[in-house]
Amino acid sequence: MSKVNGTIRRAVRGDLQALVALEALFPGDRLSAASFHHLLARGHADLWVYELAGEIRADAVVLYRRRSKRARLYSLITHPDYRACGCAGQLLALAENAAHQRGCTQIGLEVRADNDIARGLYERRGYRPCKLLAGFYDDGASALRMEKSLTNLRSAKAVAGNEASHRQHVTIPPGSS
């Protein structure tokens, strides 16, 4: 895919239909409209979207627990036509920085064990596998639990500044996810 210009911003309630439509492009383990509504309404989650030409092309959900220094990347999803544009890598970097800004020292996630592309992205970003979870997904597929330390994450002053406006304009070179 050629270079694209998009915007990463916090999701808002008005994005609900677009988020559900994006989820519908995938075969299972989808977030429902009720789940998105709950995530948008509560203070223990960040929901970021990548928007291009007025359309949401990707999203990331990060969950937090009170009094915990560990964040969980609950979902990272990219429209199939935009997988090679770097949206996922940009969202992942922002999610990590947001977790770091909240005081988290570690971030974890589960990824389908057979999803080599996603696993490759996470490994390139410093995530390390720590446990295989048999039968984790609705279809019986296994998941790989991965974790990353955020203690050595560089200060994200640019992210913090952009977070104040809830928008970050990004230009992504092809294949840079």
Image (spheres, helix red, strand yellow):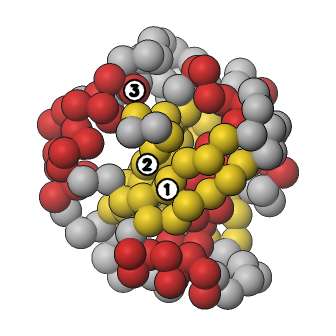
Q: Is residue 11 left or right of residue 172?
A: left
Q: The disc labelled 2 sits on which kind of residue? A: Val
Residue 49 got which mark?
2
Instruction: For the C terminus, give its image quadrant.
Output: top right
Viewer-nearest of discs 3 and 1: 1
Mark 2 or 1, nearer chain start: 1
Q: CA distance from mark 3 to mark 1?
A: 16 Å
The residue shown at (80%, 59%) is: 126
Question: Which circle marks residue 22 in the picture?
Answer: 3
Q: Please, what is the three-letter code of the amino acid marked with disc 3? A: Leu
Viewer-nearest residue: 131 or 4 = 4
Label 2 with label 1: CB-CB less than 8 Å:
yes
Q: Is residue 137 left or right of residue 172?
A: left
Judged left or right of residue 137, residue 127 is: right
Q: Secondary structure at mark 2?
A: strand
Which image quarter: residue 93? Answer: bottom right
Check disc 1 and report the residue beneath it: 8
Look at label 1 and name its amino acid.
Ile
* Disc 3 residue crowd, few under 14, some 14–19, many 20+, Cα 10 Å: many
Give the residue displayed 56% in from the left and 61% down from the top: 169
114, 3: nearer the viewer: 3
Q: Report if the CB atoms under discs 3 and 1 are less than 8 Å apart.
A: no
Mark 2 closeness class: few <14, some 14–19, many ≥20 residues within 10 Å? many
Q: How many marks?
A: 3
Q: Marks 2 and 3, Cα distance to the nearest angstrom?
A: 11 Å
Q: Does residue 15 lie above or below 135 as drawn? A: below
Q: Residue at x 72, y 79 (%)?
A: 153
Mark 1 lies on a secondary structure that is strand
- State the CA–CA distance, disc 2 to disc 1: 6 Å
